[in-house]
Each structure stands twice: as C-alpha cells, then as structure tokens.
Amino acid sequence: MEVNNADKIKLTQYSHGAGCGCKIAPKILDEILTSNFARPDNDKLIVGNHSKDDAAVYDLGNGTALISTTDFFMPIVDDPFEFGRIASANAISDVYAMGGKPILAIAILGWPINILPPAVAQRVIEGSRSICVEAGIPLAGGHSIDSPEPIFGLAVNGLVAVENIKQNNLAKQGDLLFLTKPLGVGILTTAEKKGLLLSQHIGVAAKQMMQLNKVGEALGKIKGVSAMTDVTGFGLLGHLVEMAEGSG
C-alpha cells in the first residue's frame, strides 16, 4: 500500500474505544492494584503508586528529580498522522503536569498487521516524531507488538527541580481553578466516531489535542501553584474529584 493512501483509512473504525476514554474505571483499577504484598519503601521515590498522580518522580540526589510516565491509547481520530501527534502530546503532557521538562521518549506500538498496512503505522510514527521535535526531545526507540486493535503512545522521561514538583494531591481549600485549554474534546470526538459531528466542528478537537502543554513547565516554577494535573479520560469532574479526595 502506498503511504499516500494511508491517510484515507479511518482508524477509529478499528477500535472499540477512543483515546483516554478507553481507560479502566478508577474503582476497577483500584481493585486490580490492590495487593497483600508489601511495597518496599524507597527514600528516593518522591511520587509513586501510593498516589494517583500523573507520573512517578525519583529524586536524583542533586536537587533534580527524574519524572517517568507512560501513556497510550486506541485511535481518537481517523487520520494516522494526527493520531500519532495526539497520542504523543498526551503522553508528554504528564511530564508537564508535574512541572517538569521532557527529555526523552520511547514509542509503544500495537498494530493489527493483518488488517492495517505498515504504511499507516509509519504515518502514526511520523506524527509522533513531529510532536517530539516540537517538544525538543528525541524519539529514541520503542517496542511494538501485533495486536487486535491499533494502539500507540509513549514512555517519557523528564527532569524537574525538586522544589518545583507539582502533584495532584496537594490542592488547598480556597485554591482557584485555572484551565489552560478549552473543555469538550470528549464530546466532539465521540460525535465524530458516531458520524454526528457538525462540519464547522471538524478538526477543532484534534487541534486542541495536538497542542503541547508546555505551560505546565512554567507553572511548576510558580510557588503559588499548589497542585496540577492534566484533564484526560476521566473528564474535568473526574479529575477534580481525584484531586479533592487525594488532597483531603
């Protein structure tokens, strides 16, 4: 198949869900993660799975911490190049949400090789590379498997000054809520998948999702910002509840 024809394939027809809407429900995830095995303490682990934060944070001992995260999902748009850009921007966003600066990305690709040609996956990777270039980081490698549905995302590492780390469970009573992007992406993408999207709204959601949340790195340096997170699959209300419960 020619690469030029790859853009004509509608990726959302090959997945049962869309984007972060494919996330496992919080209650079910809590059940999965519940274990009787003791979790050994690590003094260097500043943020781990004891909280529901956007990424793990490890103290390097020199005033700087390593941020580590991974995020991947099924197609949320039909265009493979845009899918690669959106999935990559979403993964990198977790580093920004911790107040950090991304430094390196590794690709995660699941592909139904007997259904979708390699040229389509190539466009996904190209989209990912383009976002990584915008973020100023290398797409340094990755891992791929043959899977029933197309899946793509990144594992991303970043750095942050320990004093600038922002978590989602440190909100304080009286804090003001500041949104850096418009809401409603989930509504638009669901409408598009069902063929109900109005012509004037085509491309609106994709444009927002392909925008890097670089502002998070700048907000991390502001002492008055007590908590941050990125709004994804659980929606604004779901993430607000998560922040409120985590912050007590």
Image (cartoon, rainbow, N blue to C red):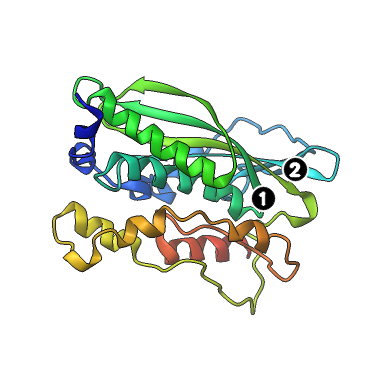
Q: Is residue 68 left or right of residue 41?
A: left
Looking at the image, is 24 positioned above or below residue 187?
above
Instruction: Pick out the residue farthest to the left.
Output: 195
**C-alpha distance separating marks 2 and 1:** 9 Å
Q: Position of residue 81 (x, y in %)?
A: 33, 40
Mark 2: amino acid? Ala
Callout 1: SS: loop
Q: Position of residue 122 (x, y in %)?
A: 34, 28
Q: Quadrant of the C terminus?
A: bottom right
Instruction: Pick out the residue farthest to the bottom.
Output: 174
Q: Which residue is mark 1?
A: 100
Q: Quadrant of the N terminus?
A: top left
How many residues crowd around disc 2 within 10 Å: few (fewer than 14), some, or many (20 or more)? many
Residue 97 appears in the rendering? yes
Q: Nearer the viewer, residue 148 or 170?
A: 148
Q: Earlier in the sequence, mark 2 or mark 1?
A: 2
Q: Position of residue 171 (x, y in %)?
A: 64, 67
Looking at the image, is 103 positioned above or below residue 145?
below
Foreground disc of the pair 2, 1: 1
Determine contact: label 2, label 1, CB under 8 Å: yes
Residue at screen point 51% across, 57% down:
230
